[in-house]
Each structure stands twice: as structure tokens, then as C-alpha cells.
């Protein structure tokens, strides 16, 4: 990495990665134990974007790509918190899902998924990106309507959600690579 990007840039990136991980795992009031900042530190995953751009000698993506990535990270973190709700509460963590409870977390997640879908529809032409956002909302609605909303999702529901979103995510990744949905020339749609 430092051969391609230079020592200074490498040290800055590595320091940011270590800093975000420290904050999430050990940081006071910013760790995974405190809402709503428990949704902030996972945004450190966005550090993959400058790393990828630097290693592949690509330009920095447009703001719409960063916003889409932010939606994806926060919604994934919140959704996963619904699976860990009981464990986090027993461990004394004060995550967003623990504070909101299952029903309100699922309502917040639904609103977030609809906002993501509206953003993707407004700023991307790609049918796969649009479909993934809407399918994620549909999967959540299925999870809510078929599951017992008074207790955490069952292991089967969790496994199904991970399989569906995982396979959809891999398919989306290939689709975006092949058609360049995040490229600057693939600007606003409808």
C-alpha cells in the first residue's frame, strides 16, 4: 500500500483504521455500548473506499456513492443489532436497538430502508441497486410479519436474513463491477 500511495497517506489511513476500531471497542461513550453513537463507529468501514481508490489508482467517488455506502453501513448495523438484542441487553450494552426495543428498532430500520430506496432511486439508474434496497425492505417486512415481534428473531430467521442479504449483496457487487453503477458517467436517473 505504501509503495503505491506513499508513506504519509498509508500512515494516515492506518491511523484512522486503528482509531475507529479503538473507539468502537474501547472508546468512552463512542463504543458499541452507547446509542446512537454505536451506529457512528461502524462508518469506519467507509475507509475501504479511499484504500480501494488508492490501490487501484481510481478517482475518489462522487458524494452519492459515499451517501449510499453510509446508508448501507448504518442499516446493516441496526439490522444486526436486532439479532443481538437480548445478548446486548444482558451484557449491559446500551445500543440503539436495546434502547428502542425490537418494535421501534424495526420501525426505524424500515424508515431507513425506505429512505435508502428513495435515495438510490433518485441518484442511480441501476436496476440492481434499486432492487436491492426495495428487496431489503421487503425482507424486513416479511421478518416482521412472520416473526414474533415480542421477542428476538429465531436462529432460522437470522440465518435466512443473512443468506438472502448475503447472496443479494454478492450479486449486487458483481453487477456494480460489471456495469459501473458508481462511475461518474452513470449519473442521475429518473
Image (tube, rainbow, N blue to C red):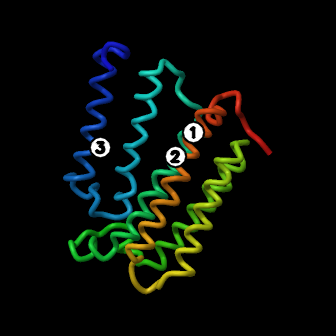
The reply to whether dot 2 and dot 1 touch (C-beta < 8 Å) is yes
Mark number for residue 157?
none
The reply to whether dot 3 and dot 1 touch (C-beta < 8 Å) is no
> Which element type, helix, strand or loop, lies under badge 1?
helix
Within 10 angstroms of label 2, few (less than 14), some, or many (20 or more) residues? Answer: few
* Nearer to us: label 2 or label 3: 2
Q: At 57% from the left edge and 46% from the top edge, which residue is drawn?
A: 171
Instruction: Give the labeled residue for mark 2.
Output: 170
Tell which of 42 and 29 is nearer to you: 42
Mark number for residue 174?
1
Tell which of 101 and 28 is nearer to you: 101
Q: Which of marks 1 and 3 precedes in the sequence?
A: 3
> In the visual, does 97 lie left or right of 108?
left
The spot of residue 70 in percent (x, y) is 50, 48
Instruction: Give the labeled residue for mark 3.
Output: 20
How much space separates mark 2 and mark 3, taking CA atoms?
26 Å
User: Please, is residue 79 above or below residue 56 in the view?
Assistant: below
Amino acid at each position: 500500500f505504501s509503495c503505491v500511495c506513499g508513506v504519509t497517506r498509508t500512515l494516515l489511513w492506518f491511523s484512522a483504521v486503528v482509531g475507529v476500531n479503538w473507539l468502537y471497542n474501547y472508546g468512552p461513550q463512542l463504543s458499541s455500548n452507547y446509542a446512537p453513537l454505536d451506529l457512528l463507529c461502524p462508518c469506519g468501514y467507509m475507509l475501504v473506499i479511499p484504500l480501494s481508490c488508492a490501490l487501484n489508482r481510481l478517482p475518489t467517488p462522487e458524494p452519492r456513492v459515499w451517501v449510499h455506502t453510509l446508508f448501507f453501513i448504518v442499516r446493516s448495523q441496526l439490522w444486526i443489532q436486532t439479532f443481538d438484542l437480548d445478548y446486548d441487553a444482558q451484557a449491559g450494552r446500551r445500543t440503539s436497538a436495546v434502547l428502542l426495543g425490537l418494535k421501534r428498532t424495526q420501525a426505524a430500520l424500515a424508515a431507513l430502508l425506505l429512505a435508502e430506496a428513495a435515495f438510490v432511486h433518485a441518484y442511480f439508474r441501476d436496476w440492481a441497486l434499486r432492487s436491492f434496497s426495495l428487496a431489503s425492505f421487503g425482507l424486513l417486512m416479511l421478518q416482521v410479519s412472520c416473526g414474533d415481534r415480542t421477542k428476538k428473531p429465531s436462529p432460522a430467521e437470522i440465518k435466512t436474513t443473512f443468506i438472502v442479504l448475503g447472496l443479494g449483496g454478492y450479486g449486487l457487487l458483481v453487477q456494480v463491477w460489471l456495469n459501473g453503477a458508481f462511475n461518474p458517467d452513470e449519473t442521475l436517473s429518473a
